[in-house]
Amino acid sequence: MIAYSWMASGVGGILGCITGGIMTQYFHPRYSFLCYSFFGIIVAIIGSQLTKECEEDEANEQSDQSQQDIVIIN
């Protein structure tokens, strides 16, 4: 999951730099700020759609399960 996060961050950074460069080259900077302001709204909408299941810590559950498997094997 961490590798996916870093990959998405890297791709987003590259695409953001290219898009930002094009927008500041050919458009007035206020349009760049207008587009950037909508990203916060998008994050808020997506964040409000999260469920309780996604907040659970899967890493602890997996380690507990592997410890139980070790106990059963022994």
Image (tube, grey):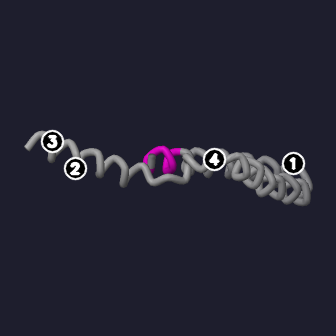
Along the line of sight, which residue is nearer the eye, 71 or 23?
71
What percent of the width, then of the height, locates residue 41?
A: 81, 54
Check disc 2 and report the residue beneath it: 67
- Residue that numbered label 1 is attached to: 26
**Residue drawn at 66 percent across, 45 percent down:** 15
- Amino acid type of the residue tagged 1 in the rendering: Tyr
- Which circle's residue, 3 or 4, is located before the other in the chain? 4
- CA–CA distance in space, label 1 to label 4: 41 Å
Q: Are marks 3 and 1 in contact (CB under 8 Å)?
A: no
Q: Quadrant of the C terminus?
A: top left
The mark lying in front, picked from 1 and 4, is: 4
Q: Secondary structure at mark 4?
A: loop
Q: Nearer the viewer, residue 74 or 2?
A: 74
- Looking at the image, which residue is at 83% across and 53% down? 38
Provide the residue span drawn in magenta. 2-7
Q: Is residue 62 visible?
A: yes
Mark seen at residue 72? 3
Point 16% across, 45% down: residue: 70
